[in-house]
Amino acid sequence: MSQKDLNLDVKDMDEAQSEVLGNKQRTLVGVTGKVVSFLAILMSLFHLYTAFFGVFESIAQRSIHLAFALVLVFALYRPTKNQEGKRIPWYDIVAILLVLGSFQYFALNAIDISARLTYVTPLSTLEIVIGVIASILLIEATRRVVGRAFTIIVLAFLGYGFFGQYLPGGLEHRGFDLMWILDHLFYSTMGVFSTPLGVSATFIFLFILFGKFLEVSGAGNFFINLSVGLMGKYRGGPAKTAVAGSAILGTISGSAVANTATTGPFTIPLMKRTGYKGTFAAAVEAVSSAGGQIIPPIMGAAAFIIASYLGVPYIEVAIAAIIPAILYYVCVYFQVDLRAKKRRPRWYAKRNDSKG
């Protein structure tokens, strides 16, 4: 099975990739694109430096990591899909400057922030303003990247912090003011700068960077071709290619989104051209790619957080995930096989009538 055999062209794959990624990102060109690329390289160099020579103080390390990420979000992600995507508008430039200003304060004053008595030492007016600005920037960046649903959840919990004292029964609490909430979120290591961000700033980014190096070097295409060679000749070959490709690629990406963006532009058009409905093709790809988070050796962010909270080496978590990951993909494989046997879409070659 190959792209040529099924008349898959670049347009098919570009359209599929656009659907997968949601068409949210800008395509920056010229000087602006080079500057953003330089910032991304600088972020990578920062994490490589701290990996070799030791991390900074926890709040400093985490705030610099988050500042890099937010700058790239406001540079690359449009506020809406209808916005022009060739340049960065003035309001996103303002957002980038606010990110640099606010998170620079956290990085430069990290030692003083760590030494203060949380909930006891009052925040200055400047610290309150910086906390409010950082909160708005984080919520907007979350909306652009993750979507409205998660943003609504964040706002609901913030609203609960402010107005929970008016709720009935067991949901009621004593009430928290703006200073207390900002103190918890940004001037301690129990809010934004807590363990999950720390794991992201020290471990997860490096694993993602390693996986991206493998993809750029051609390992991603190799894994796709390998999965085609393994599964293409069997019943339901295109769908099983998606399952095998996502499982193999998941070993180096640890990300459902990266899996979908890499294998989806190939496997989704492949399945549609061989008779599968678009909804089923997308479902197979989504479910297969989601398993990339639980398949070792490079797993999703949750695995690193589990290791950090439990105080065990990451390798123990990875070993424990081997059997569940195998069972997950075995179940997906047989579901695809049963669907292929029941529906029998048109195959691209006679040998696909053989039993899988």
Image (cartoon, rainbow, N blue to C red):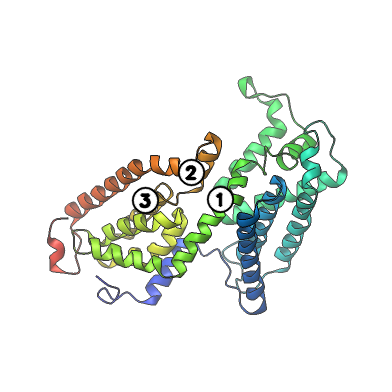
- The image quadrant of residue 285 is bottom left
Residue at disc 3, secondary structure: helix
The amino acid type of the residue labelled 2 equals Tyr
Amino acid at circle 1: Phe
Q: Quadrant of the C terminus?
A: bottom left
Which image quarter is the N terminus in?
bottom left
Q: Quadrant of residue 86?
A: bottom right
Q: Which residue is mark 2?
A: 314
Please give the residue where the numbered disc 3 appears in the rendered image: 287
Spatial CA distance of label 2 from label 1 is 10 Å
Residue depicted at x 78% and y 32%: 119
Instruction: Judge left or right: residue 7 versus residue 32.
Output: left
Q: Nearer the viewer, residue 341 or 2?
A: 2
Residue 201 image point, x, y percent: 61, 51
Q: Is residue 65 left or right of residue 262?
A: right
Q: Which residue is mark 1?
A: 203
Rate crowding at label 1 as few (under 14), some (14 to 19) or many (20 or more) other CA atoms within 10 Å: some
> Residue 140 in the image: x percent, y percent?
66, 53
Is any atom of residue 282 visible in this view?
Answer: no
- Taking depth in this image into account, of 164 and 314 the one nearest to the observer is 314
